[in-house]
Amino acid sequence: MTRPTAAILLTGSELLRGVIPDRNAAYLAERLESLGFSMRRTLMVGDPLADIEGGFRELAGAHELIVTSGGLGPTHDDRTVEALAAVAGVPLELDEAVLARITGWTDEVAQRMGFDRARFDAGNRKQARIPRGAQVLGMAGTAPGLVMEVDGSAVVVLPGVPSELRRLWQLAPEHPLLAPLIARAQPRQRLMLRTYGIGESHVADLFEQAGGDPDGVETSICARNYEVEIDIRSTAEGEAAGLQLWQRLQADLEPHLFATDERPIAEIVLELVRARGLTLVTAESCTGGMVAAELTAIPGSSDVFAGAAVTYSDRLKHELLGVPEATLEQHGAVSAETARAMAEGARRRLGANLAVAVTGVAGPGGGTEEKPVGLVYLHVSGPDGEAERRMQWGGTRHDVRLRATAAALHLLRDQLATSS
Amino acid sequence: MTRPTAAILLTGSELLRGVIPDRNAAYLAERLESLGFSMRRTLMVGDPLADIEGGFRELAGAHELIVTSGGLGPTHDDRTVEALAAVAGVPLELDEAVLARITGWTDEVAQRMGFDRARFDAGNRKQARIPRGAQVLGMAGTAPGLVMEVDGSAVVVLPGVPSELRRLWQLAPEHPLLAPLIARAQPRQRLMLRTYGIGESHVADLFEQAGGDPDGVETSICARNYEVEIDIRSTAEGEAAGLQLWQRLQADLEPHLFATDERPIAEIVLELVRARGLTLVTAESCTGGMVAAELTAIPGSSDVFAGAAVTYSDRLKHELLGVPEATLEQHGAVSAETARAMAEGARRRLGANLAVAVTGVAGPGGGTEEKPVGLVYLHVSGPDGEAERRMQWGGTRHDVRLRATAAALHLLRDQLATSS
C-alpha cells in the first residue's frame, strides 16, 4: 500500500517575485508528511488567472491531495477561487451563509473604526462567491477556506496569511472529503539525531560507513541553524532497521550529539538551567540581544531567564557590566578577556548564577588584520566554572550574528550538560 | 518585445517535506525581476533522480532561463547534476581542473582538522563530474556551479547553501550564455510606498478609488513585517502613468506613509537618530532583546545605538532600570506606568538621549482578564518629550513579539519624524 500523495500550490505574484518570502510551504509540508502523506512537489505561481488555472490543471488528478495557499482576499489580484471554479468546470455561486458571516464581521470593524460599512460590500460579495460543489472549511477573517474534489483530487483552499492558514489547516484533516486519504496515510516512524560542531559531509561519511539506508528507511542529512540534523524515516517494514541505524549513528556521533528531538537549543538550555535550579542572564555585544531573544522566544522562560545587558558601546560594557577600562584598553572590546569580564559582570550586576557573554566583529566594517570580521569570543561563567571559545567565521554580518547566537547557546548547553 | 521568462527549480527532500524552510527562492526571484526577467514559476521537488529530471523536463524549453538550487553536495542524495545530464542527453565527465580545485580545498581541510585526506576522495570525484557541454560558473566550497543550455533554455545550477548560492549567482548575469537574455531583459520602473498602521484592504480600496492599474502598470499590495507595501512596476510605456498613480497614492496614504524605498524600519530609525545627533537605547521586557537585535542588524548601528537592558524579571526592571517598586506593585509590570519608567530609566541609567521601552504579555501563559495575552505597552522618551501606545493584538507568542518589535520601531520613527 503506497502512501497518498500530496502537492502544494502557492499563489501570489509578490511571493513569486520574491517581494515577500513564503512562510507556508514548510509548515504545510511538515504537517502533511506527519499525517503520512508523501509530499511530491510544491509549485508557486503568480496572480494571473491563467497561471493559477495552469497550476491547478497540472496538479489535479496527478496528486491525491492538493493544498493551496493565498489568493482568497477581497482585492483584484485574489483569484484562486475563480481559477478553481474554472478548472472544475463549475460556476461561482453566492453563498448567503458565508456572506452573512463576512458582513457581520466587516460591520463590526466598520463600527469600531468609524468606517462606512458599504465600503466592504464589493469585497464581501466577491469573497462569498464559491464554486458550486465546494464546501466551506471555515472562515479566516473574511476569507472562506474551501474543500472540493477536482479530477479525483481533494483540494483544500487556504488563505495566504500564515496565522490564518495554520488555524484553518487544523480543520482539514477532519473533513469528510479527506477521510479516505487520512485512513490510507501511513505516518512513518521518525527518528532524529541533532549534532553541533561537526560538518555535514563528515556526518554523511559516518552514515555511509554505517551502511546507508536499509530497505524501508529514508535518511536525510541537513544543516539547519548551524546544526546538522539526521532524520531517519521508516515505513512499518523498515522500523527495526531504522532503529538500528539510529542507534549506530547515535554512538558514532556521540561527542557532537545534543538532542534526539525537535526542541530548539534555547529550550534545551532553559530546561537544563531549570533542572539545576539556576538563573541565567546574557551579556551581548555583536549579537545585540539575539541570544536573549532566542531564550525569551520559549514560553515560560521567565522563571529562569532574568534578562540581558546588550552593551554595544565600550562605555556600557564598563558602566553596566563593570568590564574594567584597563581590560578594554589593553585587550580591546573583542577579546577573550573582555568576554570573560562581561560574563562575570553580568552574573554579578544582573544577579544570576549563570551568564554567557558574546563579543565579536560582525562586519562588514570594523575588521582589522589582527581582529578580522567574523572573529567572535564567547564566555560562559557559572557555578561549575568558566568555559570559553574563540571562533572565526566567514559570511555576512547576518551569518556571523546567527552563528554567534547558536554558538553561545551551545556553549551554555555543553557547560550545563557536562557538569550535571 | 516581451521580457525573457525565468523559472526556479528548488531541489531537496528536506525542503519539500518542510524539514527546513527554503531561503533561496525569494532571493533569486527578486534578483531575476530586478534584472528585467519575468518570473513565471518556482517548482520544488525532492531528491529522487526521477523527480529532479521531471522538474527539468517541465521547465526546460518552456522558460528562457532556469535557475536551480541544491543537490550539488558530495552525498548520496545530491543528484541535480546527474539529472541535468540525463535531461540534456549527455554523459557526465570528470573535469580535472574542478577535481584539482576541490582536492586542494579538501586537503587543506583535512590537514587543518587532522582528517585522513582520502576520506574526501569519493565525494570529490562525484562533485567533479559535470555534464558534457556544461561550463563551470565558479566554485562554492567543493561544489561547482554550472551553466548549460538545455532545450533552448539557459540553465544555471547553484548550490543550496544560501550564502554560497548568493555568491555564485552574482557571477551568472555576466556569463556569455546569459548575455542575449540580459540584453533583452527590460528592468521595469519600480515605485514603492510603505505604510504602517493601515489595513491591506483599506489600501486596496484607495488603490481602486485611484482607478486601479493603468496600461503597462502592475501594482501589488502586500502585508509584510506588519507593514503594508504598495509596489508599482511599470514598463517603459507605462512609466508616466505609474508615476502618476504613485503620486496619487502617496497623497492618499500620507498619514500612514513612512518610506518610499526598501530600507528596513530599523535603518530608517537609526538614520533619523543620527541626523539629530542623538543616541538610542532600548528597554525590553516581552520582546526580550528583539528591538535591539533589529537595530544592531544594521551595519554601522554602533555609532548611535549604545545598548539595551532586557529586564525580563521585575527585579531587574527595578535594579537595572530603576523602575520604582511602588510602580510595579501598583500598576504591574505590564502597564503604561512601568513602560514609561523603563524608558526614562533606560535614558538615565544607560546614558542616552532617546529610549524606547516595551512591556507586555506575549503569552501563551500569563494573561489575565484585565491584562490578556497580546496586551503591550510601548513608551518612547526623548528630548522632544514622551510618546506612548497601548496595543492589543491576537496571535501567537511569536506574532505578538514581532508585532511589538515593529510597533516599537515605528513609534520611535513617528516621534523622530514629527519632531525633526
Image: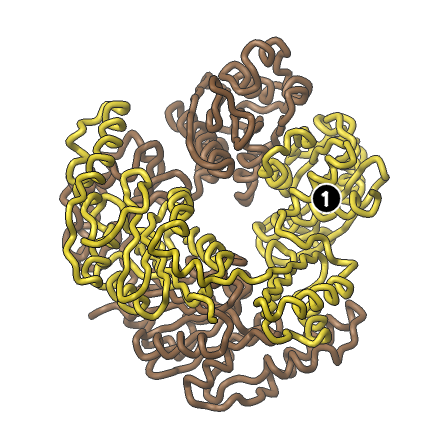
Chain colours: A brown, B yellow
* Of residues A251 and B308, the one drawn nearer to the viewer in this rendering: B308
Q: Position of residue B23 (x, y in %)?
A: 43, 51
| Above/below status of B287 relative to B227 | above
| Above/below status of B217 relative to B367 | below
Mark 1 belongs to which amino acid? Val
Lateral position of residue A401 relative to residue A224, left or right: right
Subunit ID for the residue under disc 1: B
Lateral position of residue A4 relative to residue A212, left or right: right
Q: Position of residue A323 (x, y in %)?
A: 61, 15
Which quadrant does the C terminus of chain B fall into? top right
Q: Position of residue A347 (x, y in %)?
A: 58, 21
Q: Tell me what residue is drawn at x 23 percent, y 55 percent.
A: A234
Q: Position of residue B73 (x, y in %)?
A: 26, 45
Residue positioned most to the right: B385
Q: Tell me what residue is drawn at x 20 percent, y 70 percent.
A: A1
Quadrant location of residue B105?
top left
- Secondary structure, mark 1, is loop
Quadrant location of residue B316?
top right
Lateral position of residue B193 relative to residue A336, left or right: right
| Above/below status of B246 relative to A223 | below
Lateral position of residue A319 relative to residue A111, left or right: left
Is residue A401 visible in the rendered structure shown here? yes
Give the residue at mark 1.
Answer: B334
Badge 1, how many Cα within 10 Å: few under 14, some, many 20+?
many
Q: Tell me what residue is drawn at x 42 percent, y 25 percent.
A: A391
Q: Tell me what residue is drawn at x 44 percent, y 42 percent.
A: A264
